[in-house]
Amino acid sequence: MSDGPTLRPEEDAVCVVDVSNEGAGGLWWSRAAGRCRYFHRALPAAHYGATSRDSCRVELLNLVAAARLWAADWAGKSVLLRCDHPCVRRGGSPARVQMEAALGELSRQHGFTYRLEWSIQREDPLMAVADMLSRVDKPRRTVPLESGVSALAAELGAEVQLEQQSGPGDHMYDLSQSAAGP
């Protein structure tokens, strides 16, 4: 597994998510459009204040919610999905099984392919920005979002055009629901 933002030649976009005690964030960058869409929000009340024993579930829920938010935009694309929680490297947990089922359903419904990858935040500018987004409402120990995006643009060797959008609704974090859209 790679620690950098390099996409395989066949991959059109990358989506990176992160969760902190302060909230959830995510972004996706399209190679062709040179555009970066992002969201940040408080964690849904049912998941707020996650303890370390369920942090895997909360991280994976945020990944599914981001995919539900942007699935229609990914039609016909190959997307690299990144998360910094090590549970994405291990299969078998109930949360991982539910996440894979939800992503598989979204992929079939919207006609995109994906590859899941674990990334270490400090070594990946995309993860650093996702981390900033998860803390944007309480920026106690992160650099401003604009600085992170500038570093991301330099790493990608491209101009990054930011487009904020509303985050996933609470219902998009519910794995008992089918692949609901915004």
Image (spheres, rainbow, N blue to C red):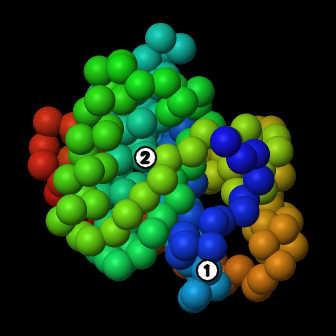
Quadrant for the C terminus, please: bottom left
State the residue lying farthest toward the bottom. 33
Query: Which residue is depicted at the point 61% across and 39% down?
Result: 118
92 horizontally vs 139: left or right: left
Seen in the image, is 156 located left or right of residue 36? right
Q: Nearer the viewer, residue 175 or 13?
A: 13
Which is more toward the observer, 144 or 16?
16
Q: Residue at x 30, y 50 (%)?
A: 103
Q: Is residue 108 above or below residue 17?
A: below
- For mark 1, give the secondary structure: loop
Q: In the rendering, at what x and y percent does residue 180 appear?
A: 17, 57
Q: Is residue 120 left or right of residue 150?
A: left
In the image, residue 68 sits, relative to residue 127, either above or below, namely below
Q: Residue at horizontal 49%, vertical 47%? A: 116
Which structural element holds mark 2? helix
**Amino acid of disc 1:** Arg
Please provide percent x and percent y for residue 82. 56, 49
What's the residue type where badge 2 is placed?
Answer: Leu
Q: Which mark is residue 63?
A: 2
Q: Is residue 177 visible?
A: yes
The numbered mark, 2 or 1, whose residue comes first in the sequence reads: 1
Return the residue at label 1: 31
Q: Is residue 150 visible?
A: no
Residue 128 image point, x, y percent: 74, 50
